[in-house]
Image (cartoon, rainbow, N blue to C red):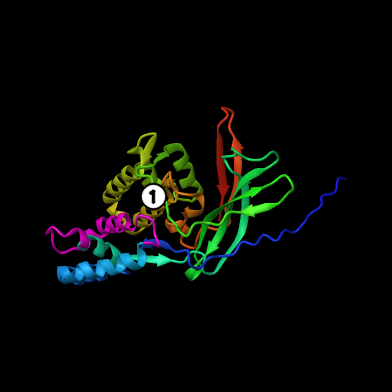
């Protein structure tokens, strides 16, 4: 039997508590959200200008495209406003900021690495390999996410891990990702949700459908089965949770790998995303795909 010599390196991956992710802050109730909006609306325009200036001075350099994020948050919470009057651009950004918070994703730990070859192996010395490391980052409240590093292995077995940038960013969920009816029906059966309700829901849908189409069908069938309201509500909720647990995301193409974070976003991921294990799969047509399992 061939023996394999293992040599411990001096490479250490350390968490960086200064790396923070900007995330949506969602109050515990709609009533609180309405009150927050009302207080911001009561501020004089001069104070809005001053507060936003202070905010951008403190947080603007810690995050990429912070203005765009705050504007998206405003669009997401504007329904809580008790007025339809046109707001200044600065007040919109300030409202978005009141529904935003920072999260130190590596505050507690950084561990459980998984390594795969980098898709770009250009401009390397002979016998060298560029690679990607996925890691489990654990932050405040013990919520886990997946973060990435890149590195380099030379012909002598020396390892270099590139220093990550200070920025962190989440991907955007792809709107109206499609679902295959046959596969979705099979998953409903595995979860014990197959029955008259879900059969009627799927009958209203095509061979492929979007989340919006599923929501519409669930709402329609739920209204028709009001006689079994409690049972129907539970099945309807779990059906939508199943769909929300299967989604597509897109990172900004020009973002660096070390800036990209996969943070839990669905009900099934409420305890975090842990221990992603990536593998490189070579397709028959010559293309390559990275797959991963996670907890």
State the quadrant of the C terminus. Answer: bottom right
Q: Is residue 107 left or right of residue 177?
A: right
294 lies left or right of 61: right
Q: Is residue 39 visible?
A: yes
Is 88 one of the magenta-colored residues? Answer: yes
The residue located at (67%, 52%) in the rendering is 159
Judged from the image, the secondary structure of the residue bearing numbered disc 1 is strand
Q: Give residue 292's position: percent from left, percent from top.
A: 57, 47
Q: Quadrant of residue 60?
A: bottom left
Q: Residue furthest left?
A: 85
Q: Is residue 247 above or below residue 100?
A: above
**Which residue extends farthest right?**
1
Q: How many marks?
A: 1
What residue sits 39% from the left and 53% below the top?
A: 235
Looking at the rendering, the stretch of residues picked out in magenta corresponds to 61-90
Task: Say which residue label 1 marks.
Answer: 172
Percent from the top left, x then y, of residue 136? 56, 59
Residue placed furthest toward the top: 285
In the displayed structure, would residue 227 be above or below residue 196? below
Residue 131 percent location from the top left of the image: 61, 47
In magenta stretch: residue 65: yes
Judging depth in this view, the residue of 221 and 64 nearest the camera is: 64
- Looking at the image, is 206 positioned above or below residue 47? above
Near-viewer residue (5 or 224): 5
Answer few, some or many: residues within 10 Å of disc 1's Cα (few below 14, many 20 plus, some between 14 and 19). Answer: few
Image point (22%, 59%), residue name: 78
Q: Quadrant of the N terminus?
A: top right
Q: Position of residue 18 (x, y in %)?
A: 48, 67
Residue drawn at point x = 67 percent, y = 59 percent: 11
Please name whichever residue, 195 or 237, is drawn nearer the observer in this view of the structure. Answer: 237
């Amino acid at each position: 039997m061939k023996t394999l010599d293992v040599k411990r390196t001096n490479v250490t991956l350390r968490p960086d508590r200064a790396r923070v992710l900007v995330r949506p802050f969602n109050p515990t109730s709609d009533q609180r959200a309405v009150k927050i909006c009302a207080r911001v609306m009561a501020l004089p325009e001069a104070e809005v200008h001053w507060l936003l200036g202070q905010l951008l001075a403190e947080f603007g350099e810690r995050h990429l495209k912070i203005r765009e994020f705050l504007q998206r948050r405003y669009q997401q919470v504007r329904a809580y406003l008790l007025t339809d009057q046109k707001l200044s651009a600065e007040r919109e950004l300030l409202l978005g900021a009141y529904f935003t918070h920072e999260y130190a994703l590596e505050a507690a730990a950084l561990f459980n690495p998984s390594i795969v070859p980098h898709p770009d192996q250009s401009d390397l010395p002979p016998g060298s390999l560029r690679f990607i490391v996925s890691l489990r980052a654990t932050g405040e409240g013990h919520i886990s996410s997946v973060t990435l590093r890149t590195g380099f292995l030379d012909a002598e077995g020396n390892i270099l891990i590139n220093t990550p940038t200070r920025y962190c960013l989440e991907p955007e969920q792809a709107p109206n990702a499609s679902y295959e009816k046959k596969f979705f029906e099979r998953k409903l059966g595995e979860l014990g949700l197959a029955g008259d309700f879900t059969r009627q829901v799927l009958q209203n849908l095509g061979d492929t459908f979007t989340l919006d189409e599923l929501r519409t069908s669930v709402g329609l069938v739920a209204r028709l089965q009001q006689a079994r309201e409690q049972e129907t509500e539970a099945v309807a909720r779990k059906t939508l949770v199943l769909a929300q647990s299967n989604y597509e995301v897109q990172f900004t193409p020009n973002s660096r790998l070390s800036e990209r974070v996969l943070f839990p976003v669905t009900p099934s991921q409420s305890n975090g995303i842990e221990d992603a294990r990536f593998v490189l799969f070579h397709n028959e047509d010559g293309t390559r795909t990275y797959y991963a399992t996670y907890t």
